[in-house]
Amino acid sequence: MEVLAGPYAAAAALLALGGAPKVLRPEPAVRALASVGLPGSPMLVRLLGAFETCLAAAALTVGGRAVAALVAVSYVAFAAFVAVAMVRGGVLSSCGCFARPDTPPSAGHVAGNLVAAAIAGIVAWFPAPGLLRLAAAAPVPALPLVTLAGCCAWFAYLALTRLPPRAAAGRRRP
């Protein structure tokens, strides 16, 4: 389904934005896992981060049903983790998604993960071509798609990392 190629590319890029930092700084994700009673070690988090990053690269380049299904499963797992963290009261300062200390779990985080999972699930059912195939077929129209998908991923990243701390600070003011 080509109409979802852009949103799917944005979801895949966001997956890379969340996975790559875990490889370099696994500690926030290790603490997040421990806060809800899940096992976690720096090596496990690094492996998961590397898997997320490679999966994102595969989604962005070659695409395919299996890759899209794995992206969907990843986002469902992220949504479940954030929901569990919120219910159990764990992960007060960071969910570990972006290796930043100020990305607390939120309902918006759960909703964003579920939207990304739905997009990837639809792409798994009705495959969208990978960006390499789109660029090979029509290089000029692929450029705006890649640019817009990148912008959407960046805005989603900012919404998940910058807005929650600002909203919390606004609630504390008299």
Image: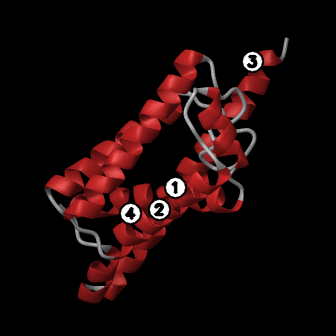
- Residue under pointer 1: 48
Q: Earlier in the sequence, mark 2 or mark 4?
A: 4
Q: Mark 1 and 2 residues: CB-CB less than 8 Å, in contact? A: yes
**Can see residue 154?**
no
Instruction: Please identify the quadrant where the C terminus is shown.
Output: top right
Would you call the spot at circle 4 few (<14 residues within 10 Å), some (14-19), or many (20 or more)?
A: many
What amino acid type should be assigned to the residue bearing mark 2? Phe
- Residue under pointer 4: 9
| Residue 119 relative to residue 10: left or right | left
What amino acid type should be assigned to the residue bearing mark 1? Leu
Tell me which colouring the rendered structure shows: secondary structure
Would you call the spot at circle 3 few (<14 residues within 10 Å), some (14-19), or many (20 or more)?
A: few
Choose mark 4 or mark 1, whichever is in front: 1
Calculate the distance from the C-alpha at mark 4 to the C-alpha at mark 3.
34 Å
- Residue under pointer 2: 51
What amino acid type should be assigned to the residue bearing mark 4? Ala
| Residue 29 relative to residue 136: left or right | right
Choose mark 2 or mark 4, whichever is in front: 2
Q: Mark 4 and 3 residues: CB-CB less than 8 Å, in contact? A: no
Q: Secondary structure at mark 1?
A: helix
Q: Earlier in the sequence, mark 3 or mark 2?
A: 2
Residue found at x 62% / y 56%:
43
- Residue under pointer 3: 171
Instruction: Please identify the quadrant where the N terminus is shown.
Output: bottom left
Q: Position of residue 118 (x, y in %)?
A: 29, 43
